[in-house]
Image: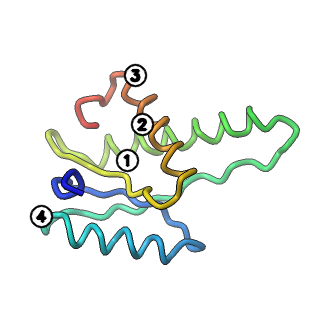
Amino acid sequence: MRSIGSTCSSFRTREPEKEDLARLRLETCEQYIRDRTYRLVSFETPARSMDESDYKRSVRDWHSRIEQGYEKLLMEELGEGKCGAFLVWGDPTLYDSTLRIIETIKSKGNIAPRI
């Protein structure tokens, strides 16, 4: 929670079916983020293709689209020296895939100083 307290921008997915979890994440931000000028940036997570003929390729393509969206968020929403957080706790699948995707973005070196 100390880490979330220093963010300037928080990114959250729009998940109508998980509105209670989204509300809890927002309440946590309001409680722990010290800088009251922080921004909450909502974004759409691309839907995964339900083509089950090649499940692995479907997931790989889906994660690639999510990665592109995350990179765009980081490039457009975080200024130099700013810190952001992806609000994904409480959903193990989203949390785990987000960690992998962020590591992939960092490994490219394009925006590593911002992560």
Q: Of the residues tagged 3 and 1, which is closer to the observer?
A: 3
How far, Cα to Cα, is label 2 from label 1? 12 Å
Q: Earlier in the sequence, mark 2 or mark 1?
A: 1
Query: In front of the other: label 2 or label 1?
Result: 2
Residues at marks 1 and 4, CA–CA distance in whole angstroms: 22 Å
Lower position in the chain sequence, tag 4 or tag 2? 4
Corner quadrant of residue 5:
bottom left
Q: Which residue, given by chain and number where applicable, does mark 2 sit on? A: 102
Residue 72 appears left or right of 112 = right
Is there a contact, CB below 8 Å, between mark 4 and mark 2?
Answer: no
Q: Amino acid at mark 2?
A: Ile
Residue 93 in picture, x, y percent from top left: 57, 50
In this view of the protein, which residue sits in the foreground, 77 or 23?
23
- The correct choice, above or below, for 101 with respect to 32 in the image is above
- To which residue does mark 1 refer? 73
Question: Mark 4 — residue?
Answer: 34
Tell me the amino acid under the disc marked 1: Leu
Amino acid at dot 3: Lys
Quick one: label 1 or label 4, which is nearer the N terminus? 4
